[in-house]
Image (tube, helix red, strand yellow):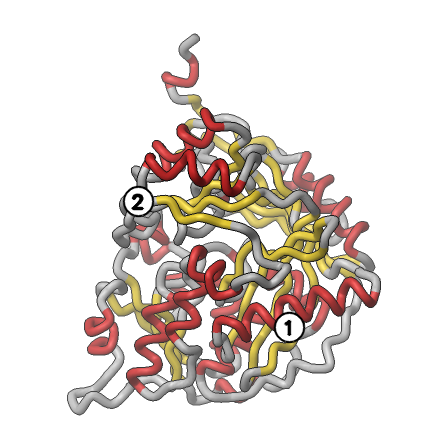
């Protein structure tokens, strides 16, 4: 990854508190780059083991990438406020933010209470709670028909109203957890039984057990990476999204930038900007997922944070602007000079998933994969880790990343490197039974 250009010198002498953080290389890289430019970073966390996964905390990359770790209940607003204020209640930090879907609302609430820059907490919550986003968009053509279901008795009505196929998902989750397509009543009932039993998020927050149902819209899905500054939404560009695991929707690769005809690009950017304006989101990064259908663009989700899965690296290498660093500039009250955005070359990432469940013994082919021109091999598992085969993005074990002259060549090289990797496991006994 190239080092971002100027303007990040404004970090010097500033301090930011991050309420939890994203995992993996791109976000650790962002921390290191910000600190190289003089930013002091406090990580507020309620569970160090969520990052360490049973390994030694001090050996984790994120432990070395922050200046201070504050152990605090990151689901408790008052506890977070106490952790970053002095005896007189004055903030000891210049900014407070989060890129974690499970903590962006609390971070926005804390920033507002402290008089620090940040988005409207109500806007963040509307985006994060997916049925509220649908309600906020109303009858615009790029919305999707939906129904929030709180009991099994409502399934027949939802089926009549929305028809099949439809999408079933938890109303407030991340990493595609629980998202699946249902094609008939039997599948709908099965999805309801499973999803209504989810009473805590992946980070432990209580959940109602409600299930969001949406009409399925056929089309090619992309995401739009943006930064909203003083109410104006700047667009870095469009990212492709490769999916697998039907009827689930798991991300397996991205390229950037996706070229579009002028009229389609303008229509897409208008949809994204109008979506963020409709919920009152006027400050910070957003990762908006949209599908191109026969009847136009349809908004899937709006995520008020930087994108994951190396997409920040894609944007940085192609535009020279880092969404992570620009978001932290906003958090400390600085305005990043984003526009005009110029694309130079292309980049791609391939997300790698295990083909077998079990305990990781070794990874073969790493040297050969790293020898593919322009490719970085970024693994986040090690010997002894349990490899999952859950139907969401959390079972990803690493990335092959490539920055090249164009996105398609970069994709071909990232795919070539990924095909050379073999994750050798000691399989669980239950997987060996007939």
SS type, badge 2: loop
- Please give the name of the residue rendered at 37% of the width and 86% of the height, measured from the top-left corner: 116
- Please give the name of the residue rendered at 71% of the width and 71% of the height, measured from the top-left corner: 319
Is residue 275 depicted above or below 116 in this figure? above
- Please give the name of the residue rendered at 52% of the width and 81% of the height, measured from the top-left corner: 37
The image quarter containing residue 154 is top left
Which badge, 2 or 1, is on the more N-terminal residue?
A: 1
Q: Is residue 154 left or right of residue 271?
A: left
| Residue 198, percent from left and from top | 31, 41
Which residue is under mark 1?
Answer: 3
Q: State the separation of the CA atoms marked 2 and 1.
A: 44 Å
Is residue 52 depicted above or below 132 in this figure? above
Q: Is residue 91 left or right of residue 130?
A: left
| Residue 155, percent from left and from top | 40, 36
Image disc number at residue 414: none
- Circle 2 residues within 10 Å: few <14, some 14–19, many ≥20: many
| Residue 46, percent from left and from top | 26, 60
Nearer to us: label 2 or label 1: 2
| Residue 65, percent from left and from top | 43, 67
| Number of numbered labels in the structure image | 2
Which residue is under mark 2?
Answer: 209
Q: Is 367 in front, or is 99?
A: 99
């Amino acid at each position: 990854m190239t080092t971002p250009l100027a303007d990040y010198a404004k970090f010097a002498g500033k301090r930011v508190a991050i309420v939890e953080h994203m995992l993996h290389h791109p976000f650790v890289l962002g921390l290191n780059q910000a600190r190289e430019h003089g930013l002091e970073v406090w990580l507020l966390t309620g569970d160090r083991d969520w990052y360490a996964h049973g390994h030694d905390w001090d050996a984790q990359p994120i432990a070395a990438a922050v200046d201070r770790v504050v152990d605090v209940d990151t689901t408790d607003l008052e506890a977070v406020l106490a952790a970053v204020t002095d005896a007189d209640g004055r903030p000891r930090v210049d900014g407070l933010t989060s890129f974690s879907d499970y903590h962006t609302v609390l971070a926005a609430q804390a920033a507002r209470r402290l008089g620090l820059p940040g988005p409207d907490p109500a806007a963040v919550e509307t985006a994060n709670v997916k049925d509220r986003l649908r309600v906020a968009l109303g009858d615009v053509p790029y919305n999707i028909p939906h129904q929030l279901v709180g009991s099994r008795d409502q399934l027949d009505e939802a089926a009549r109203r929305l028809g099949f196929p439809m999408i079933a998902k938890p109303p407030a989750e991340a990493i595609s957890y629980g998202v699946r397509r249902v094609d008939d009543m039997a599948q709908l009932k099965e999805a309801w039984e499973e999803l209504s039993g989810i009473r805590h998020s992946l980070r432990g927050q209580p959940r109602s057990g409600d299930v969001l149902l949406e009409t399925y819209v056929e089309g090619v899905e992309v995401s739009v990476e943006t930064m909203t500054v003083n109410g104006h939404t700047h667009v870095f560009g469009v990212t492709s999204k490769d999916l697998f695991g039907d009827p689930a929707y798991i991300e397996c690769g991205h390229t950037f930038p996706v070229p579009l005809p002028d009229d389609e690009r303008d229509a897409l950017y208008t949809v994204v900007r109008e979506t963020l304006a409709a919920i009152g989101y006027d400050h910070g990064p957003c990762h908006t997922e949209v599908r191109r259908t026969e009847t136009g663009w349809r908004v899937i989700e709006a995520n008020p944070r930087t994108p994951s899965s190396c997409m920040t690296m894609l944007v940085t290498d192609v535009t020279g602007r880092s969404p992570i660093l620009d978001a932290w500039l906003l958090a400390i009250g600085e305005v990043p000079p984003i526009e005009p955005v110029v694309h130079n070359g292309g980049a791609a990432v391939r997300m790698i998933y295990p083909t077998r469940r079990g305990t990781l013994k070794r990874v073969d082919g790493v040297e050969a994969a790293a020898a593919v021109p322009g490719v970085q091999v970024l693994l986040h598992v090690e010997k002894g880790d349990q490899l999952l085969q859950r139907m969401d993005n959390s079972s990803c074990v690493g990335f092959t990343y490539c920055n090249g002259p164009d996105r398609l060549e970069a994709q071909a090289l990232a795919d070539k490197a990924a095909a050379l990797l073999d994750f050798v496991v000691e399989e669980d006994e239950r997987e060996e039974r007939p």
